[in-house]
Amino acid sequence: MIPITVVDVRDAEDLVVEVLRSGAIAQGPMVKRFEDAFAAVSGTKHAIAVNSGTTALVAAIQVLDLQPGDEVITSPFTFVATLNAILEAGATVRFADIRRDDFSIDPDAVAAAVTDRTKVLMPVHLYGQTADMGKLVPLAAEHGLQVIEDSAQAVGASFEGKPAGSFGIGCFSLYATKNITTAEGGVITTDDDALADRLRVLRNQGMRARYQYEVAGHNYRMTDLHAAVGIPQLAKLDQLTAARQANAKRLSEGLAGTPGLDVPQVLPGREHVWHQYTVLVGPHAMLSRDELSAALTERGIGNGIYYPKIVFDYDCYAGHDLIPGARVEDFPVARAVAEQALSLPVHPHLSESDLDTIIETVREVLGA
């Protein structure tokens, strides 16, 4: 089986042992070391490590002090953590449709979705490529909106040379399958000194010093053990990203012209880090997306459907007070992409033979 992802953190053994031998395994100097390295990668003054990407999103919204009824505009095609975080923070969710070329929120749809209660724009940098920040940032400024980037899948990505997570408040995931992983973890990035200070207090039960409480906080802390796992990966992020980019280029060249299959695009001015290599299986393909997925699995090619539905199209969100008036039919591009998107292996551990097998198998089952 060629897996959809491979997790290899053996380079972290020495640092993990160092933490274990120290006897201090909660948040400490290793977390600070990780934060400094991550800030350098994200091109920001501050990187605040937390215990998950979802926590990063929740905390980023909380420090903006939104009031009941204040709205966050985001994408309907994303992992459910995006939506869950907004709901947990008590904000109202408004959605704007996506573009087919980058799988991210459409600036024109965002402009149409803004109301007098909108306070935050939360683009999702999906699959490793940023949203169109060249249009979204000026749009946010025009309407006085804060920008929170859901950069969970985009560590190392950039738009016109500016890193993901540096356009506003950046929120990253370090889950096991991400390009940089600490098993569980997240990071919030910002250039705002005051916001960074508030986030650090918030993540530590609202304490600035022991038993000196300044806000009603939470335990959002990362441990030194988790940080130790991530530090060696940050040191070789360029190498890992280059391998993903080379694999994606090879896949796109090999799959070009396959009937009914659209390969992913790298749009001008964007550095794609290929968290996922996601094709679209169109209505004229020999097999449907689900049929292609099953055929590849049967032939030993790992694949993934990220994501099978629009994010709110589940019973648990039906009629939710903080998701007013959202209907699947209002987002035709997101709905079509959810029906057609299929991700193929692109991770750095693929061999030349693996890539040949993936290309040949996809072309074969689609009649190329």
Image (spheres, grey):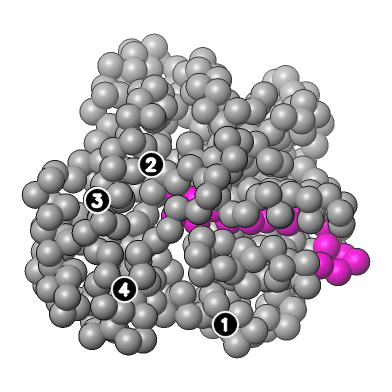
Whether residue 140 is visible here, answered yes or no, is yes
The residue indicated by pointer 3 is 250
Q: Which mark is residue 217?
A: none
The answer to whether 85 is drawn above or below residue 200 in the figure is below
Q: Amino acid at mark 3?
A: Arg
The residue indicated by pointer 1 is 332
Q: CA distance from mark 2 to mark 3?
A: 19 Å
The residue indicated by pointer 4 is 261
Q: CA distance from mark 1 to mark 4?
A: 19 Å
Q: Amino acid at mark 4?
A: Leu
Camera-side mark, 2 or 3: 3
Q: Amino acid at mark 1?
A: Pro
Q: Earlier in the sequence, mark 1 or mark 4?
A: 4
Left or right, 171 with respect to 250, comes to right
Camera-side mark, 1 or 4: 4
The answer to whether 270 is drawn above or below residue 194 in the figure is below
* Residue drawn at x 12%, y 73% as measured from the top left: 364
